Amino acid sequence: MPKIVNKNEETGRMIKQLSGIGVTHDMICSIAGISKPTLYKYYDEELKLGKAQSTVTVANNLFRMATGHGKEALTASIFWLKTQAGWKETDVVEINNVSDENDRFTELVKRVRHTRLSQEDSDKSVN
């Protein structure tokens, strides 16, 4: 017979707060003394609301910082633009002498082939 769960406001507030600060569902279950199915069945709304309200609070704070002044504004602005505006950092690799690079690559391939062939010959002679 399934355990009867008495959902109450106090547990609901606690679950909402814990979810909002990023506590894992496993930990919330341990603290509340309930199973995961019980958590999801009876406290799903608290889990979602706690997370959503905290995200809004942090986003508002980040936006305030990004639109402010000083070092923290620069960092917050860069983060905001990367995560919300699709900006990204790119690395540029310049090759000045392509023929020199090609010669080095060709030599490396020859050495790898020679080593592999030598190894195959020694493997055959052992067998």
Image (spheres, rainbow, N blue to C red):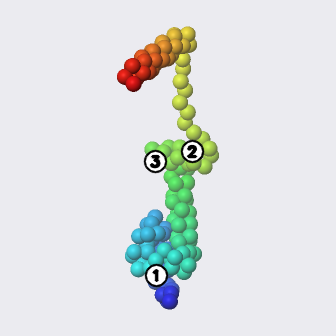
Q: SS for tag 1?
A: helix
Real-space CA distance between mark 3 and mark 1, rounded to the nearest whole angstrom: 37 Å
- Please name which of the two marks, 1 or 2, marks the residue nearer to the observer: 1
Would you say residue 50 is visible in this rendering? yes
The amino acid beneath tag 2 is: Lys
Quarter occupied by residue 99: top right
Tag 3 residue:
72
Q: Note whether 95 is above or below 46 in the view shown.
A: above
The amino acid beneath tag 1 is: Thr
Disc number placed over residue 117 in the picture, else none? none
Q: SS for tag 3?
A: helix
**Residue 26: x percent and y percent?**
43, 69
**Residue 24: x percent and y percent?**
45, 66
**How packed is label 1: few (under 14 Cα within 10 Å), some, or many (20 or more)?**
some
The residue under the point 53% across, 24% down is: 93
For this rendering, which residue is in front, 18 or 74? Answer: 18
Q: Note whether 7 is above or below 68 in the view shown.
A: below
Q: SS for tag 2?
A: helix
**Residue 45: x percent and y percent?**
57, 75
Marks 2 and 3, the one that precedes in the sequence: 3
Disc number placed over residue 82 in the picture, else none? 2
Would you say residue 69 is visible in this rendering? no
For this rendering, which residue is in front, 84 or 126? Answer: 126
Marks 3 and 1, the one that precedes in the sequence: 1
Disc number placed over residue 11 in the picture, else none? 1
The residue under the point 54% across, 58% down is: 59
- Please name which of the two marks, 2 or 3, marks the residue nearer to the observer: 2
